[in-house]
Image (cartoon, grey):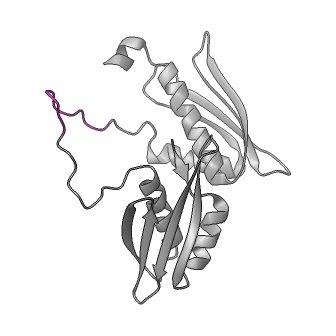
Amino acid sequence: MNFTLPEEGLQRLTAQLNLTGTFTHTLRSAYGGHQLMARVRIERGQPNTAVRIEMGDQVHTLDVQTAHPEKHLQVADFIDAIANGRVDGGELAQPRVTRQPLLPEPAALLSETQLGRLKHMVRHGGFASLETGHEHPIHVAVHRTRPAEGVTVIASIGAARPRTKCFTVRGDQRECLKRLIISIEHLHIIATPQRAAAA
């Protein structure tokens, strides 16, 4: 399950980081109705602001620069990482029981340039052909919806019998970009030959 701090929580966190106090935030799962509560204790100081996050039986701390213009994004990403189990605790992890060496992390599917292009398209609309290592690129067209904020996306890969996705996402640019990237990754996976996917 993937939990995220919603947009209204991010806006509140931006204001809260200018104060000292304890605040409660609710994280929601991306596609379900599940919720997770987090207590955030902020001690504003100079040059750093100390942030303590309590979630269930976990307690994590983070120091951010008080003058940093995107400190709210740093804290929000840290909260998301805790909620999704991507932050290591202070205790040693249990040793892994395996007979084979661990596989290295796979390379990112999209380059920084491609991600930048997708961000631009989510803001303004447009078209791009993304090379992802297949014989054919993934073609992506994005149209901004009005008056409700969101995008309509058409994405396809292949020539003779292309695999296509078409959907509309309502929400802020962050949510639209996330759904667009998930869709591109899914097209990449279903276009990968079975033997290559199993290797």
Q: Quadrant of the C terminus?
A: top left
Can residue 70 be spotted in the picture?
no
Q: Residue furthest right?
A: 147
Residue at 56 percent of width and 74 percent of height: 23
Residue 20: % across, % down = 52, 85
- Tell me: 33 left or right of 75: right
What secondary structure predominates along the stretch shown in magenta?
loop
Residue 136: % across, % down = 52, 21
Can residue 193 be spotted in the picture?
yes
Looking at the image, residue 151 lies above or below residue 160: below
Q: Which residues are magenta?
A: 96-105
**Residue 143 lies within the magenta run:** no
Quarter of image, res 32:
top right
- Tell me: 71 left or right of 13: left
Give whichever of 22, 149 is nearer the camera. Answer: 22
Quarter of image, res 94:
top left
Q: Residue furthest bottom?
A: 46
Q: Residue furthest left?
A: 99
Q: Residue furthest top?
A: 160
Quarter of image, res 125:
top right
Residue 73: % across, % down = 51, 65
Residue at 15 percent of width and 27 percent of height: 100
Give whichever of 172, 57 is nearer the camera. Answer: 57
Residue 107: % across, % down = 35, 37
Looking at the image, residue 136 lies above or below residue 13: above
Residue at 45 percent of width and 22 percent of height: 134
**Residue 99 lies within the magenta run:** yes
